[in-house]
Image (cartoon, rainbow, N blue to C red):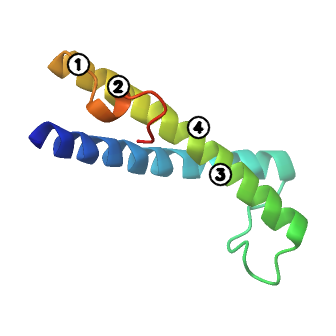
């Protein structure tokens, strides 16, 4: 039980770290590719649909990939420390 709760904290921290790490990189990539700052609020009526949708897709894909990479790294660190993967990671097809 303690291992399960500890893993949830570790996985949550990995996901949060992924979000923080990706945000700055994503903004820089958007600016380099488009020559302008990303939309501050894609839901705003002043942001055009193409720009809002492009930002939503780029953000979603980047965050999903980063979360996966960080959580897999956390699972490997967990295995190194404990000798086994967390139960949530062991189950095939289980969401973290």
In terms of secondary structure, where does tag 1 sit? loop
Where is mark 4, residue-wise?
65
Nearest-to-viewer mark from 1 and 3:
1
Mark pair 2, 3: CA separation? 25 Å
Q: Which numbered disc covers residue 84?
A: 1
Mark pair 3, 4: CA separation? 9 Å
Q: Which numbered disc covers residue 41?
A: none
Disc 3 or 4, which lies upstream in sequence?
3
Nearest-to-viewer mark from 1 and 2:
2
Which residue in the rendered view is the most extreme toward the left? 2
Where is mark 2, residue-wise?
90
Q: At x 32% / y 47%, what residue is drawn? A: 13
Q: At x 81% / y 56%, what residue is drawn? A: 54
Viewed as shown, does residue 35 lie left or right of 87? right
Give the x, y percent position of residue 58.
72, 50
In terms of secondary structure, where does tag 3 sit? helix
């Amino acid at each position: 039980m303690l291992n399960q709760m500890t893993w949830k904290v570790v996985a949550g921290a990995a996901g949060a770290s992924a979000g923080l790490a990706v945000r700055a990189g994503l903004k820089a990539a958007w600016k380099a590719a488009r020559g302008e700052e990303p939309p501050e609020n894609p839901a705003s009526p002043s942001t055009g649909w193409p720009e809002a949708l492009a930002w939503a897709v780029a953000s979603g894909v980047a965050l999903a990939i980063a979360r996966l990479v960080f959580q897999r790294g956390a699972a490997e660190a967990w295995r190194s420390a404990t000798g086994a993967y967390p139960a949530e990671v062991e189950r095939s097809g289980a969401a973290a």
